[in-house]
Each structure stands twice: as C-alpha cells, then as structure tokens.
Image: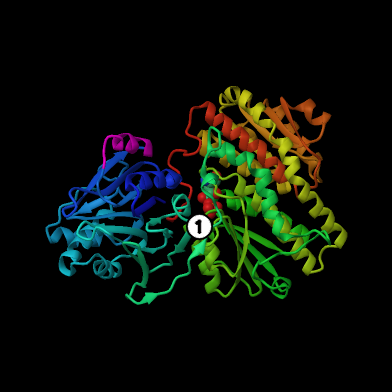
C-alpha cells in the first residue's frame, strides 16, 4: 500500500519522482524518501533524503538539495514492519544498492537471522531493508543488478513489488513483483516505473503492466521484460486514456470534494457504453461474457471490501428484484477464508475501484480455481482484478484520488442497475416495459444528482453543529440500508467519529439504547415500498430524544414534521434512489471532517489501495 516511483531520463529526477509521489500519496503517507544519483560523472553515489510524515515534509527537506544524476527512486510509505519514522522510511540503501518496496516479505525473520549470522548490520526495523542486503551481496558476486535480482527473487515469499537501482549501473532500473501493482511508463528517451499510472501520465501515456513473477529491466532508453526464470517475454504496450489534468484538484479544496461534484458525469460515463438509444434497452457492451453464459447463471456471489462491498450489497437488492437470481454478498476477507460453497453455474462478481485490493483479488482467484464464472467491476482498467476476471464492466469514473471512495461508488451503483436489467432481459425475468422504465429512471439520475449537490452548502454551514454530536446513526431499509452503511463508513474514516449503519427495522433489537439527545440519526427514507415502516422507525428514534436528519423524496410534510432537518431528493424509482442518497451522506462526512480540521483526502491510518491482507 505504499507508492513507488523510479525515473531514468533527461528531466530532473527529483521533480519527476516528487511529482509522482504526490500523485501516489493516497497509497500511504506516513513517511517518504528519495535516492537519486549525485556526484561527478564517473563517481556517482545515491544521495538519500527521507522524512517522517507526509510528503510535504520530504519536499521541505528537498528544497535546498540538488542532484547531478539522471536516475532515482522514491517512495511514500504505509507502515507494515517498523513504526513510521525516518529510519524506517524508504529507500533502503546497502553498499550502493538502493530499493523501494511495497508489500510484505513474509519470511523476513528467516532472512534476517541468516543475514545477522553473516554479520549484517541493520539500520531500520523493516523487512524491506533485508532485500537491499540480499541484493548488495548478490551484486558483489555477479557484478550485475539484473542477475542479482534473479538470484534474490526465489528467496522471497510474500506479496511485494520492488524497484532496485545500483550506483555502479547508473542507467539501470530493475523491478519485480508478486502481488502489488507495478507499471512501466515507456516515454520518449525516458522511463518511469511506478505503482500506478497516475505517477506516469504527465510523462507518457504508453504503459506496460507487470504481471506477478515478471522482471522489468530498464537500461537507458531500452526496456525488456523477463520471467522470474530469466526467459525474455513480450509485453503489450497499452495506451492509457486518463489525462494529467484529471489528477488535479481543479480549484476544489480537496480531491474528495471535486470527486463528489464529478459524480453526475461519472454515472453518465458508466452508463453510456451500455445503452441502446434506439431500442431504449440495456445492451452490455464488451463485457466478455455471452448471453448464454449469463442466462445459465443460477446464483450470484458479490465480493468486495469497504465501500465497494456496500455498493455490492445494493446490487443484491437490484439483481434479486430485477433478474430474480439469488445473490450472496460477501466481504472478500471473509469469503476467502470461510471455505465457501460455490455451486456450479454461479457467477462471482468482484467489485473494486482500484482493481488491486488484495483480499478481493484472492477471492477472485479462489473462485476461478473452483471453476466459477467471474465478472469484475473495476475503475482502473488493466488492474490485476480486471486482468484476471473472465468478464469486465468499467466504472469509467476517471482517477479517484481521495482515499474515501465517492464517484466509484455511484458509478458502481449505476453498473449494478445495468447488469441487473440485462440479466433480467436475457433471462426473461423482466418485461420490456419495466426494463425501459427502470433504464429511463437511471439515465435521468445525472441531472437529478446535480440538484442534490446543492446540499454542499447546507452541510458546509451545518458542519460545526454536527461535529458536536457524540455519534451518528445512519439508518435505512431495503436498498437504502447499504447507503446507511456507506454513510457511517464515510464518517468513521474521515471524521473519526463513532457512527453506525443499521437496517432501520433492526433498531429496536439493540441500537435504540444508544439514542439520546446527543445522538444524531440520519434516516434514509425515500418514498418507496418501505417508506411507512421506515417512518415508524424514525418516530421511535425521535421518541427517545434523538436528533433527526431525514432524507426523503420531494416535499414530504410528514418527514419534515418529525425531523430537525429534512433533505429533499428528486422523485426517482427505488433502483435510482441510492445514487441520489449517496451525495448527502458523502457531503455530511466531508464537511464534518473538514470542520474538524482533518486531512480529508488522506485520513489517518488509511491508504486508498489496500494491497496487503
Ligand atoms: C472507502 O472510502 C474506502 N477507503 C475503502 O473502504 C475502499 O472502498 C476499499 O478499500 C475497497 O477498495 P477497492 O474498491 O479499490 O477494492
């Protein structure tokens, strides 16, 4: 969950690496560092600068430092082994070999014991430094960094991506991986290696994705790929469509706020490829699964983590109601270890914005081993999950940089609508009229969302009062229940406040005891078939002294009468309501966290892409 950047080329490596790390900071931000060649032409050594804390601390240190070389590596860290500190920050350098690492070396204790026996002296508490020691020993033997990597790779177990450089080969970068992503940007006379395309797109849009147990060898302007056994392999150069301006804040205070405001466009972009405008019906384009395969599905398992899991939970309601297929929804880290029974003719649907979440990827692999048909919903094309699934749906949200997921969530809700409608269509579970009506509602969502974004102002003004509550209970029924869960997750991760998401009908089985006048209730209560029952739950909460924000449909007097604040959403069908309801709960968390002075884009202890278990 760290960010890695390496550069060889004519530009100032410091600028490229720090610029790249800035765009990867969402991956980890407890310390950062660079190692860049410096010194007279024929006697260059790595000058290493590292700092505890966010990238800004490193940038301050680097202000007065310059480098003469054209090769360097950098890292932004999310600590696994060793506390966040300058001493544990990467790069780790041993005898002229410097490396950055993302992941975990699981056999580090054995390696450390062996190295200690040989007299190695350690300067950090990390597992990563041990790999630098191993490589330093092997370059001494072989005189070549690539050969050293070939020898060291089989000695490592765990999930890792590692980028190494050696001062004796000042135009060489060698990187390899098993797990966390690594991407090579192939520029005009320059090479960038990074954890994510966002660090590369300012320099080139030509990239190569490394697979597990592959090694990339950059020498000057040349790049070659090899298997772990040293056999040359041919790799496809992919042209990426994301642009550099998509990863800027565009005048917003935070990426998260920008991304919240981008949501109408994100939903439209998710829908666009899958709508037949002539027939006004859903056509799943380029999904990679045939109608026959989709018709044959008898059970769906939706597997994801965090916000993607909550989107999946909404998908359960959509698929069951629209396509009449039973759905199980699982947290990936639970699914993979519970010996799941996957009957024949099951579809495993994995959802992941990043496409790199370790547990979701492992669950996908497990399902494939069991012979199941798999379909992924990802935002990042060519990410590991996207590459490994049989079928593919794309969020098309553009880069999501705020650690808190927003636009990927609503894009997924839109895709789950489309998938459900299409499954309903091919299986004959849905009349053409009902499909067209639901689709029409979905296509109206982007303009309705624009109207809901006006609550930005309300929450900006209300935030000071809202942050004083001891906690917030989010509640909803049916397909609105996952939005309650998502609202609570957002508040926890951004405002570090106690929040719970509950199925409103479950309230009297326990959480009602939490309610008093210091507890805020956010009741998601649109005019759908559960409305009356949810309204009764709201009354129960109010009777216990809870303060109420209700989110409902149109000008609802009954809700207004029983709420401290009533937020009105445009009239929509049940399948679209969650997309509209997401906006106020996101804005609430954003503004409360902002009012508390938190770093909204980089909440404490978190990283956007969770590539370790
Ligand atoms: C959401 O705000 C989170 N930061 C987190 O729960 C996230 O959704 C989860 O880690 C899954 O990520 P993915 O969609 O990239 O797999």
Question: What residue is disc 1 on?
Answer: 333
Residue 57 within the segment the image draws in magenta: yes
Judged by its main secondary structure, the magenta piece is helix
Name the spot of residue 227 as percent of width and height, x first.
Answer: 37, 73
Mark 1 lies on a secondary structure that is: helix
Name the spot of residue 2 as percent of width and height, x first.
Answer: 39, 50
Residue for point 69% across, 29% down: 548
Name the spot of residue 65 as percent of width and height, x first.
Answer: 26, 38
Question: Of residues 450 and 80, which is closer to you in this image?
Answer: 450
Toward which corner of the image does residue 140 lie, by quadrant?
A: bottom left
Residue 111 visible somewhere in the drawing: yes
Asked whether, in this view, residue 349 is left or right of residue 113, the answer is: right
Which residue, as the protein is rendered here, is positioned at the far bottom?
231
Which residue, as the protein is rendered here, is positioned at the far left?
119
Asked whether, in this view, residue 85 is left or right of residue 246, the answer is: left
Q: Which residues are magenta?
A: 54-66
Q: Tell me the quarter of the image containing the C terminus.
A: bottom left
37 vs 50: above or below: below
Any atom of ligand 1 within 8 Å of the CB at mark 1?
Answer: no
Question: Of residues 389 and 398, which is closer to you in this image?
Answer: 398
Residue for point 30% across, 46% down: 34
């Amino acid at each position: 969950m760290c960010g890695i950047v390496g550069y060889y080329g004519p530009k100032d490596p410091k600028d490229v690496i720090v610029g790249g790390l800035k765009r990867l900071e969402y991956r980890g931000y407890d310390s950062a560092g660079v190692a860049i060649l410096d010194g007279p032409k024929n006697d260059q050594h790595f000058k290493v600068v590292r700092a505890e804390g966010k990238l800004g601390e490193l940038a301050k240190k680097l202000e007065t430092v310059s480098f003469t070389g054209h090769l360097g590596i950098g890292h932004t860290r999310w600590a696994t082994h060793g506390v966040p500190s300058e001493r544990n920050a990467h790069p780790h350098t041993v005898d002229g070999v410097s490396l950055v690492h993302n992941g975990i070396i699981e056999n580090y204790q054995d390696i450390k014991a062996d190295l200690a026996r040989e007299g190695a002296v350690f300067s950090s508490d990390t597992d990563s430094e041990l790999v630098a020691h191993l490589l330093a020993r092997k370059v001494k033997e072989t005189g070549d960094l690539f050969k050293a990597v070939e020898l060291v790779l089989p000695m490592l177990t765990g999930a890792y991506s590692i980028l190494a450089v050696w001062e004796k080969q000042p135009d060489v970068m060698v990187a390899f991986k098993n797990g966390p992503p690594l991407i090579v940007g192939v520029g005009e006379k320059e090479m960038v290696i990074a954890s994510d395309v966002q660090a590369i797109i300012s320099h080139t849009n030509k990239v190569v994705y490394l697979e597990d147990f592959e090694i990339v060898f950059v020498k000057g302007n040349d790049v070659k790929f090899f298997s772990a056994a040293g056999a040359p392999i041919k790799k496809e150069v992919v042209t990426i469509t994301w642009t550099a301006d998509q990863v800027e804040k565009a005048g917003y205070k935070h990426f998260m706020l920008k991304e919240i405001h981008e949501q109408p466009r994100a939903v439209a972009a998710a829908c666009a490829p899958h709508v037949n405008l002539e027939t006004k019906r859903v056509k799943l384009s380029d999904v990679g699964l045939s109608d026959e395969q989709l018709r044959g599905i008898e059970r769906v398992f939706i597997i994801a983590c965090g916000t993607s899991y909550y989107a999946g939970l909404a998908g359960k309601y959509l698929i069951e109601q629209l396509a009449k297929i039973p759905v199980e929804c699982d947290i990936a880290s639970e699914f993979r270890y519970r010996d799941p029974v996957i009957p024949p003719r099951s579809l495993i649907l994995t959802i992941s914005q990043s496409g790199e979440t370790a547990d979701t990827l492992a669950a996908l692999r497990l399902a494939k081993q069991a012979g199941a048909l798999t379909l992924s919903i990802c935002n990042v094309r060519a990410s590991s999950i996207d590459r490994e699934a049989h079928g593919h749906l794309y969020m098309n949200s553009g880069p999501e940089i705020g650690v808190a997921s927003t636009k990927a969530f609503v894009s997924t809700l839109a895709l789950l609508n489309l998938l459900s409608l299409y499954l309903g269509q091919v299986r004959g579970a849905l009349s053409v009229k009902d499909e067209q009506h639901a689709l029409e509602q979905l296509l109206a969502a982007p303009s309705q969302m624009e109207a809901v974004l006006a609550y930005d102002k309300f929450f900006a003004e209300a935030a000071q009062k809202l942050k004083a509550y001891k906690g917030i209970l989010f509640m909803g029924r049916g397909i609105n229940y996952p939005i309650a869960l998502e609202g609570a997750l957002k508040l926890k991760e951004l405002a570090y406040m106690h929040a719970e998401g509950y199925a409103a009908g479950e309230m009297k089985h326990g959480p009602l005891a939490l309610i008093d006048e210091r507890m805020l209730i956010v009741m998601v209560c649109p005019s759908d078939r559960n409305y009356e029952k949810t309204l009764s739950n709201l009354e129960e909460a109010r009777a216990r002294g809870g303060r109420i924000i209700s989110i409902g449909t149109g000008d609802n007097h009954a809700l207004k009468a029983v709420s401290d604040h009533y937020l009105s959403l445009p009239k929509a069908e049940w399948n679209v309501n969650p997309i509209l309801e997401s906006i106020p709960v996101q804005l609430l968390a954003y503004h409360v966290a902002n009012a508390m002075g938190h770093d909204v884009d980089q909440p404490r202890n978190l990283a956007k892409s969770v590539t370790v278990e």
